Image: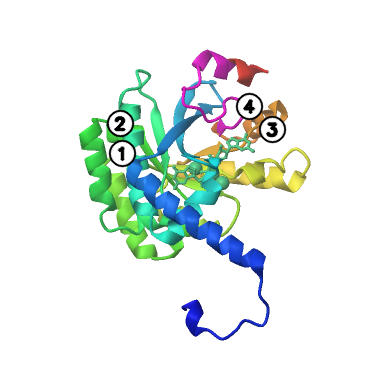
Amino acid sequence: AKAARSPEPCFYDAQMDEAVRARRELVTDLRAAVEAEAFELHYQVQASVETGEITGYEALVRWNHPTRGRIAPLVFIPLAEESGEIVPLSIWILRQACFEAALWTNRHIVAVNLSPKHLADPRLVETVAAALADSGLPPERLVLELTESAIIHDRNFALDQLQALKAMGIGIALDDFGVGYSSLDVLRSFPFDRIKLDASFVSAIDHDDQAVSILRSVAALGRTLGMSVLAEGIEQPAQLSIVTREGCSAIQGYLIGKPARVLADPGEVRQAMLL
Ligand code: C2E
Ligand code: CA
Ligand code: CA
Ligand code: CA
């Protein structure tokens, strides 16, 4: 509603007004940044707990704002979702990740986060096919990570989209498992290749026996369903031992590598996992 038409507010909140103005400004900047492609991708290593070998790298977008510096994706991704900038941004991320990964001599997998709005875009399958064809990245080297919130909106359409992507040979990961609406039904009905256990869940395992029991069950469930289970947010060697003991197949976290422009070195990753 236009401010001019609304009645005088009973409480005038200058702080709120300022927050709204700042937000609107950020949306404008975001729009310009998408147009100028003022983002870059950092990559965080993922490794097998069994062998210590690298299994892939997750692409994480970074925005260096011209005056405010680095803005966290947890701030600007939701803003992009709400303001309609997410699909163009998401297309840029996908294409950039494919083009960069196509140049990696190690031929590892690149995992790209897929926003809920992009999964709902009818042109997604076409966009992904074009990104692969244009970059020359084989479909087997691309994994798309998505959360359950991407699925609950239009379930049947989400299933169609994921099945089409899967048929192309792309891997699909269920992100942030263990928080939110994680349901067994989604695991059963959707073509996931891997489950990513959320970091907030993993951080509880060194002091919470119940969390360890759940971890063990999820790892077993993944094995039964033929999905690999990756534990996110591993910072401590103790956490690595627990997830290894309980049957997780892979890890990601600061212990073995932070997101960076330069890909983590295999020797350093193996070293970190031996500690
Ligand atoms: P996510 O997909 O769950 O990504 C993992 C986040 O955990 C990343 O934060 C990563 O830097 C952080 N992380 C990794 N290891 C550790 C650890 O050991 N300890 C702690 N404390 N944190 C760790 P980041 O890069 O800030 O991204 C936050 C979220 O923003 C992502 O969560 C994802 O939901 C979203 N996001 C980031 N990049 C993209 C993107 O390219 N596209 C989309 N759609 N979303 C993205
Ligand atoms: Ca992710
Ligand atoms: Ca995650
Ligand atoms: Ca998360």
Q: Which residue is mark 3?
A: 239
Q: Position of residue 146 (x, y in %)?
A: 45, 49
Mark 4 and mark 1 lie on one chain; the one further toward the N terminus is 1
Q: Position of residue 10 (x, y in %)?
A: 67, 83
**Residues under numbered marks 4 and 1 in contact, where contact means CB atoms less than 8 Å apart:** no
Q: Residues within 10 Å of mark 1 (few under 14, many from 20)?
A: some
Q: Which residue is mark 2?
A: 99
Quick check: can you spot residue 186?
no
Please name the amino acid that badge 3 sits on.
Answer: Gln
**Separation of marks 2 and 4 at Cα, in angstroms:** 28 Å
Q: Which residue is mark 1?
A: 95
Find numbered disc 4 in the image and state the secondary structure of the residue it sits on.
loop
Residue found at the far bottom of this picture: 7
Residue found at the far right of this picture: 207
- On residue 255, the disc is 4
**Residues under numbered marks 1 and 2 in contact, where contact means CB atoms less than 8 Å apart:** yes
